[in-house]
Structures are given as C-alpha cells and as structure tokens.
Image (cartoon, helix red, strand yellow):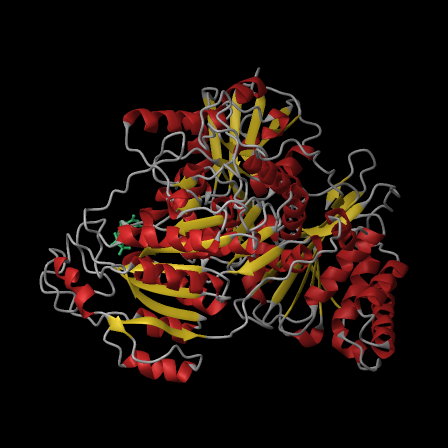
Amino acid sequence: MGMNMNDAASTTALAPKDYKSSVKPVWCPGCGDFSVLSAITKALAHMGLNPEDVAVVSGIGCSSRIPAYLNTYGFHGLHGRALPLATGLKVARPDLTVLVAGGDGDGFSIGGNHFLHACRRNIDLTYIVMDNQVYGMTKGQASPTTAPDWARSKMTPHGPGINPFHPLIIALGAGANFIARVSSHDPNGTAKTIVEAIRHPGFSFVHVLSPCVTYQPEQREWKKLVRPAPVEATSDAGRAARRLLTDDNLYLGVLYHGDRETYRPRFETTKVDPSQLEQEFII
Amino acid sequence: MTLDTTTGTPSSISIALIGSGGSGVMTAGSMLLDAAGRSHWYAYMTRSSGPQIRGGEAAALIRISNTPIESHDNRFDILLAIDWRNAERFAGEIPLDSDSLIVADPDGGDIPDKINAMGARCCELPMKALCKNITGGRPNMIALGAIASLVGLPEQSLIDVLTKVLKNKGEEVITSSTEAIQAGISACDSLPSCPSLNPPEPHAAKRLNITGNEAVGIGALRGGVRFVAAYPITPATEVLEWLAPMLDKVGGVLVQAEDELSSVNQIIGASFGGVPALTATSGPGLALMMESIGLAVAAEVPIVVVNVMRGGPSTGIPTKSEQTDLNIALYGLHGEAPHLVVAPTSVADCLFTTQWAVQLAEALQTAAIVLSDQSLGQTRAVLDRPADLALMERRNVPTKIGPDYKRYAVTPSGISPMALPGTTGGQYTADGLEHNEAGTPSSQAEDHLTQLDKRHTKLHGYNFGDHWADIEGEGDIAVITWGSSSGPVREALSQRHNKERNVRLICMRLLSPEQPEKMEAALEGVERILVVEQSHSGQFYRYLRAHYDLPAESKAFHRPGPLPIRPFEVHRELAEWE
Ligand SMILES: Cc1ncc(C[n+]2csc(CCOP(=O)(O)OP(=O)(O)O)c2C)c(N)n1
C-alpha cells in the first residue's frame, strides 16, 4: 500500500489555470462557488502540487460539482458520503493530498454523522464546506444552517422553526484539528487559508460563506458584513469554544489550530505472505 | 448416524452437548471437534445459544465422520446434558428418535417434556458427583471423556488438544482436566452401548479446522484485499475480527467505521486509490449500503461486500441462518446496475468464492456481493484444505497514459483502463452521475445508452468458466440449490444408494450475471427439477423462473429459517417422484 508515484514538487511551475479542467460549471452567474474553485486552484498552484497527486472528493449538490472542474483526480460520489470515501482513499494512499468539498446540506444534514467522525478520527484531510444556508441543487429548501424564520421554501412555508447548526463549534467539540472561516468574496484570502489547512496535519475544516444568489440573494450582502476575527488563532480548545459560542457566523480567519495526533493506521513494512496465515488452521 | 453402504457400520455420528451458563459445553465441543480432526476424522460443529450476551444456555451440535461433511444429519445419536435449564428451547434443533441416547446428569434437573417426548433412550452420568473427587475437576471435561470414549476417539488425541488449549492456564489445570477426562472415559463403561465410528483412514493431505467466516478472511487475503472498513454486526463480525490482525501482518489495514454507509464508501475510496478493498456485513448493513454499491457500479470501482445472511426482515433473527437476502442482493440497486452476486456452497467454499469474488470485482471493475450466511459463517468444520485459485486477472491499470485517455472509453470487452491517482495524465473524476467516456457528467441519451451497454457488456460478455456452479452426478431429475442449502442436499443425494433413479445436483455459485446457456447445457436430458432453498417466499425459485428455461415439471421446496434444512426433507420431495 501507499504507492509513491511521483514526487510532490513540480519542476516547471504551474499556474492556477493549469488546475482547471475544460468542463463548464453548472452554477448560476454570481454563485460564490466560482471563487472557491478559483481559490482551490490558487492554493494548489501556490503549493506547487502536481495535479495528479491531488484528489478532490465530493458528495452531491451544486457545490459538490467542483471536482469535475478541476484537473486533479476527483470523485463525485454520493450525497453526504464524501468524507468516508475520502477517508478510505487517504488511508489507502497517504501519498496523495486529499481535499473534500461540498455543501452545508451534504456535510451537516445527510452526512452529519460522518462529519462528527471525520473530525474525531483526525485523518489528514482538508474539508471545504461551501455554506449557502440552503439546498441549492434541489431548488431552495432549508438546510441545517438556515435561519429558523426563513419562510421562502414551499416545503417549510413557516420557516424551518428550529435553531441552525453551528458547524464550527461542532467541529471543535468533535475534535477537528484546524478550524477556519473564510468568505468566497475574497478568493485570495480563501486560497491562503486553504494552503494553511492543507499544510496543517490532521483533519482541517474550512467553512466558506459562499452565497446562493438564486435562493438566498440577500447573502450578496455578506461581503459587507464579514470581518476578520478580532483575535489571533488559538490552540487552546477552551478559549476557541468560548469564542465560537459568541460568534455571529461572520468572523473570518483561522479560529483554532490544534496539535492532536493525526490518525494514521499502521502499515507493517515487513510483510508476511498470506499463505502463512493459514497455518493456524492446519491440523 | 449415517451408515457406510459397503460395511453397514456408521460413517458418521451426531452429538449434541447442552448446558446452562458457565457449564463449558462450547469448550468441550470445540475440543471434541479438534480431537476428531487430529484423529483423521472430518467434523462439523454449530453453536446455538440463548439471547444472553454472556453465559446462558448453550448447545454444541457436532457431527464426526469418515467422509467429508457439509451439513448436520437428520437426527442426533447422542444428547448429553450437563443440566437442563432452559433446554427446551433446543428441542427443535436436536431431533432424537428411539435409537438416540440421552446422557444426563442426575443433578441437572428433569428432562424437559419436549425432549422426553421424542422417545430416546436415557441414561445417567453423574458428572458433578464425579468431579467431587478431582480437585479443580469440571463436569464438561467428564462429559468430553465419556463422549469421546463412546464414539471411539483415542484418549491421546484428547490429551493433545487439552495440552494445546490449556497451555497458558498452568500445570494444575491441565492435570485436573486430564483426570476429569479419564474419569469420564472410565464412567463410559457404565453407559449403554452406542454405535461407534470405524477408525478413519490416515490421510496425507492437509486438513483445516476452520469456520466459514475465517475462510472468507483467507479468501479475501488470497484475492489481494488490503483494505477493509466495516461496522460490527452478527453474524459477520468474526470475518472482521480475524482479518484485523491478519491485515496488519500482510501490510494492509482495517478501519472500524461509524456505520455501514461509511464502511462501504471507505472501501470505494480505497479501491479508487488502487487498493483492493472489502467490507463484511449482514442484512441490516447491506440494506444501508445499497445506494453506495450502485455508486461503485456506476463509477466502475471494484469493491467486495460480504453479506453473512441472518433471519430477516428488519433486525430479524441475528444469530440464525436464512437465505433471504437473495432478492436485495440481486435487485436492490436502483436504476439498472449490473453487478456480481456470488455465493459459497460450503464452509470450505467460503474461501474459494471470496477469493474469486475479489478477482472478478477487480477484473470487471464492479461491485461483487458475496452471499454467505450464518450457518456457513459460524460453523466450525474439519475439512480438506481448498486449493489456491490461480490468479486469473488483475485490474486493468495503465502505467503510461496517452493524450487521448478516457477513463470510461468504450472497448470490446466493456472494460476500460483505470488510471490510479498519482499517474500523470490520467486525471479524471469518477462519477455516479451518468457520464460520457471521459467521465464528464452527461444526461444525453447517447451517453446513457453507451455507458449502460458498456457496463452490461463487461459482465454479460465475460466467460466465468466452470465456476458458475458445482455440478455433480447424472440423471433426469435435477436438484438446483445454492449457498448453505447445498450441504443438506448433497447429504441427501449421497444417502440415495439403492434408488433406481440418479439425481443430478446443481449448486449455483454465480447468481448474477445469470448464465442461461450454461444452465441449459447443465440441464440437458433433465425432465424434472426440484429447487431447494431456505426462504419463506421461494426467492431462489422465482429467480430461476425469471431467468432460466426450466423443464415444465419443476417444484420448489422452500421454507424459512431458523432451523437448518435437513436431508430427509429433500428425500421426502424426491420420494414423490420415485
Ligand atoms: C440520498 C439523496 N437524497 C436526496 C438527494 C437530493 N439532493 C441533491 S443535492 C441536495 C442538497 C444539496 O444541498 P447542499 O449540500 O447544501 O449543496 P448546494 O446545492 O447548496 O451547494 C439534495 C437534497 C440526493 N441526491 N441523494
């Protein structure tokens, strides 16, 4: 296992556009996900990673379409199941840089259990969630991060009526090793944070405020409301927790970086031939 | 007991040991099986227990034979009870008749009515009382000595097993157990006579003492599996518990997942990365995995899902066998998703079929479901060591990629080279969305048809060779069966000696894709068919009717679990045609 196919450092420098594929995105004009795509390509170019040594795994949703738009290896899997698929890939192929991308519905609703356990397992993955507080792909239903009084979905005409999920606090509680929030209106800042997240060992969670201009048009205002977190990133989980509990969802920056040990299943290098394992059964 | 046709002496003997929590009947049963194996006999043991997690009443059901065995007999020769607490629950599993012998401890309470009603002979063996004279002596070791002596097992084989099993428990325990065994052997003289086995033929070929679940594990490793992700579930857990330390040794890994949705997606991810991957589960877990198995089919990622069936629906009967996940395995995927479904036909075959499934999934870049069941998985048997299946084909992985590389390119076989991450120029996005040859999502009619055809051709154009079924015998009557029902059917047919009509046996191993031409050839000259399966609704019979041309005169014997199918039930069906 763990084939080492190519060295990470490229000899000829690659530009962000070299990480883009020729497939045209399905996104609406003005969708925040365009700049996340561009931020990912900038981050990969900055790090000089070979496209073939990167795999981007996603679930289902508008945002989850992202792998096809990249020139890396990709897996566009099932709704909610990107994290386990990426877990298997990273454990089997620790030599690859594995990014996981998707939406708030994909990651916090149908995939919520995997989110908890991916944080807890702390495998060296970078998870980028494009949160638009709505189900874009299925045309505008409430998601786990939608406000309780958001009454514009036919499915919940009085609003979802329940408190939104707070992904960063949950990630901290569940054991994520790196937690940051960025805004898609700033692709350079987003790219910088993605680089940090990739470099940070263990499970890194990057929460991106990425407006849905079609079903949540007022999110266009986010770019005016977001602001850098007034304090430095902390590695003290207690302080991070207090800070996040008073967070209004609009503070940007790296909020927590921990030093929990990365889960790296042990691979024996001295291998026994499988036929020897049958000895225990021989009479 | 089964009689040897030439000599008229028994060629097999069936023994049940029962007792309540802590009585140690399972230990005694395992040691009996092991000793029989060391004495060159074949042996077969299933366990039955109450719902308690620890302790509680238990039964070790054992059959020892001169010839290979794959099922229980119609009846038991000996039932030994250390005590009778809650023993009536085992009445259905331990059929007795007037030739059977019940050996009971007089201190163990009264024989339950349901067991008494079967009319067996009874005798007493004061196991608890005999222990009083032996420091540290235990009734189960008295029982072991007495039974071994009754059936003709040499004392030395018991001592050898004892020394091996108890080697970490210290000299004192070994001494007291040896004494108890010897006391059992002496006490045997006071018991009524009972048929004993002919001494076995010494053999040179290696034999294994193994369960079906362990055999699945070996098959997986022989097939090349190096990544396993799974969530515990009865009766599949032993596959995982055996594999975890073994994967360590061969340079692989097992990850315990948070649920089955995770385990199946983890193996898809690992396999996408190039590492052959497998998970094991049972019905409830398989149901959770269905959407993801469809993803593996659509994205053409090889995976193997071993489903050790138990009674269903819902949580069902977790500790008992049934062949009722056939429908979900064959038809449970949404959309049209050709995939492999294979089933081992015996405990030994769990090894071969799993190895085959891994190789097929890898070669055909698709999902394989292996349908084992509780009765194959948790049976421990002494059997001939299955041969290693020569490696047929590997996954088609290109090392050099041309400029026109397309992951889902149409080829005559339908199999297209699968670039692994890390390979320069091979970048593509694996997708469960319908896609074109390059892998780009597409909802165009042409692309859909092209890819449907491709995935169909891969499986339906492939030559699976002779492994699709085990076919034995000649005759114008055929019995078609599958999985764990193969054992009792084989047993029934081997007992048909003086019958005029020969019967052909077809045990299907490959259930999907279906093989109508091979079946037609196998059925040449057959006028009547009996289908045997362990399901209430006849799932296998309906499957055969849907996909194969069966002779006009065909009937099905199907009934649900949890009781195993017995050879006489097959006889009864065939007798109607004599
Ligand atoms: C098992 C399953 N259930 C439902 C769907 C339908 N579905 C597709 S995308 C989606 C929600 C997507 O929302 P989100 O993850 O927030 O992504 P966005 O489209 O907003 O980027 C749903 C419910 C599905 N594809 N699979």
Q: Position of residue B560 (x, y in %)?
A: 47, 47
Answer left or right for A28 relative to B454: left
Answer left or right for A245 relative to B83: left
Q: Position of residue A256 (x, y in %)?
A: 40, 75
Q: Is residue B161 above or below residue B345?
A: below
Q: Residue at x 47, y 35 (%)?
A: B339
Q: Is residue B423 above or below residue A34?
A: above
Please identify the quarter of the rendering in which residue B331 is found. Answer: top left
Answer left or right for B538 relative to B57: left
Q: Nearer the viewer, residue A153 or A6?
A: A6
Q: Is residue A133 visible?
A: yes
Q: Position of residue B165 (x, y in %)?
A: 79, 66
Please identify the quarter of the rendering in which residue B552 is found. Answer: top left
Disc tally is 0
Q: Nearer the viewer, residue B524 or A37?
A: A37
Q: Nearer the viewer, residue B572 or B131?
A: B131
Q: Nearer the viewer, residue B214 or B481?
A: B214
Q: Residue at x 49, y 20 (%)?
A: B412
Q: Position of residue B104 (x, y in %)?
A: 70, 68
Q: Is residue B413 above or below residue B111?
A: above
Q: Residue at x 46, y 65 (%)?
A: A203
Q: Is residue B432 above or below residue B501?
A: below
Q: Is residue B328 visible?
A: no
